[in-house]
Amino acid sequence: MTPASVGFQCPECVREGLAATRSPRRAPLRSVGQKWGPVTLGLIAANVVVFIATAASAGIAGGNPLNNNDSPLGHQLDQAPILVDIGQWWRVLTAAFEHVGVLHIVLNMLALLVFGTELERAIGRWRFLGLYVVSLLGGALAIQLFGDPLQPVAGASTAIYGLLGGLGVLLLAGRQSLRGLVTLLVINIMISVLVPNISLLGHIGGFVGGALVTGLLVLTRRRPKVQVGAVVAMAVVLFALAVTVPTAVVLGL
């Protein structure tokens, strides 16, 4: 399987950039003493549970639980485009919660904790969850359309790059500097290109999906019902395309 590690993070640029984008009329989502976003923590918990399950599966099969590269359960969860083509649709979702090795999940969960908490506080719980789902589906669609049909991919970094895309839109909407974010993206793109077994396609697809859905949220910020419909519609369209457009057709095979 191909880990899709997110690389380095820049918590300072998130805190500085989002400070001016929060609406003063909206009550804070966290209560006094609550340090992390509840949806963010829930997503981290889901990823950890899946990692433990795949590690146990690898151990039962006689492999190294901490590596879990040969986990039978993991092979049922990763996104192999050719297997999605033949009807195993769940892979476009489950792959974003699967990680290969301790370092892979630690890096991605640290990134999710930092960026997720800040974005969850900035745009609200359900909007943040919608951003996360659309981002992972955007990454999954990019992999389905343009990735190696036989290459399995796993990791939450498709969604995490979507959070970066959403952050960029919020910074633009708040007329804040993009310097820190651009630097972060350049570093991570270089890592994705130079380091083997990192899904650059998934990162790009996630980033674009996150930027688009956040743009919709900004444009419809005074119309919450429209926001719900727009986010749900985008998620449904991305999922439908990911599971119905044959990879071989797109690649001309």
Image: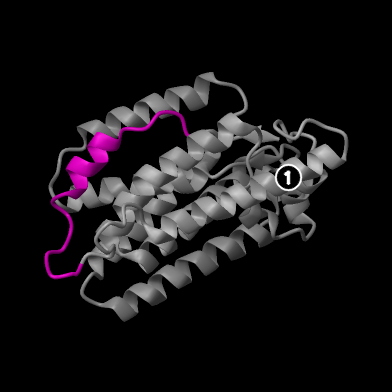
Residue named by callout 1? 54
Residue at horizontal 31%, vertical 52%? 35
Relative placement, left or right, of 233 versus 2 is: left
Q: Which secondary structure is most common in the magenta stretch?
A: loop
Relative placement, left or right, of 177 versus 119 is: left
Relative placement, left or right, of 131 versus 103 is: left
Q: From which residue to which does the magenta span run?
A: 6-27
Q: In which quarter of the image is the N terminus?
A: top right
Residue 48 x %, y %? 59, 47
Residue 45 x %, y %? 54, 53
Residue 70 picture quarter:
top right
User: Residue most toward the front?
Assistant: 33
Relative placement, left or right, of 240 versus 35 is: right
18 magenta-colored? yes
76 in relation to 107, above or below: below
210 in relation to 55, above or below: below
| Number of other residues with Cα within 10 Å of mark 1, as a class: few under 14, some 14 to 19, many 20 or more | many
- Whether residue 207 can be seen here: no
SS of the residue under disc 1? helix
Residue at horizontal 71%, vertical 60%? 89
Residue at horizontal 51%, vertical 45%? 158
Amino acid type, label 1: Thr
Residue 60 versus residue 69: which sits nearer the camera? 60
- Whether residue 95 can be seen here: yes
